[in-house]
Amino acid sequence: MRRAERSLTHEAHKPSAYIPIDKMAYRVPEAAHTLAISRSRLYQLVAAGEIRILKDGARTLILRAELEGYLDRLSARQPS
């Protein structure tokens, strides 16, 4: 196989070559970035019970549905 052919074959196996799927869960920094808030603010929301977390060993995960639910509740509290 020639170098160019190997390169094309190799590129197809890189994760970036796959069609992206929506994430079902986020780590804390990703969740904060997704909501456009600081990590500190995210932890405040967790402490207040606004957003629930899941623990997987040392990892802290936040479900996409939790983030969407928080935004829905926040939107509902806004004056019309």
Image: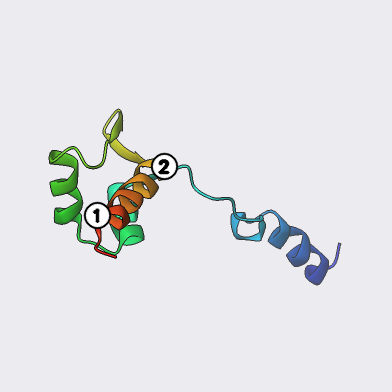
Q: Nearer the viewer, residue 25 or 44?
A: 44
Residue 8 horizontal side relative to residue 46, left or right: right
Q: Colour scheme used in the picture?
A: rainbow
Q: Amino acid at mark 2?
A: Ala
For residue 13, side relative to residue 71 (left or right): right
Q: Tag 1, which secondary structure?
A: helix
Q: Amino acid at mark 1?
A: Arg
Q: Quadrant of the N terminus?
A: bottom right
Image quadrant of residue 56? top left
Q: Residue furthest front?
A: 80
In this rendered view, identify the residue nearer to me: 74 or 26. Answer: 74
The quarter of the picture where the C terminus appears is: bottom left
Of 51 and 54, which appears nearest the observer?
51
Question: Upstream in the sequence, badge 2 or badge 1?
Answer: 2
Residue 62: quarter of image: top left
Mark 2 or mark 1, whichever is nearer to me:
1
Left or right: where does residue 20 sit relative to residue 59? right
Q: Residue at x 24, y 63 (%)?
A: 79
Question: Residue 77: which numbered mark, if any?
Answer: 1
x and y, in percent, of residue 43 in the image: 16, 47
Residue at the spot 36% in from the left edge and 59% down from the top edge = 34
What residue is pinned by disc 2?
65
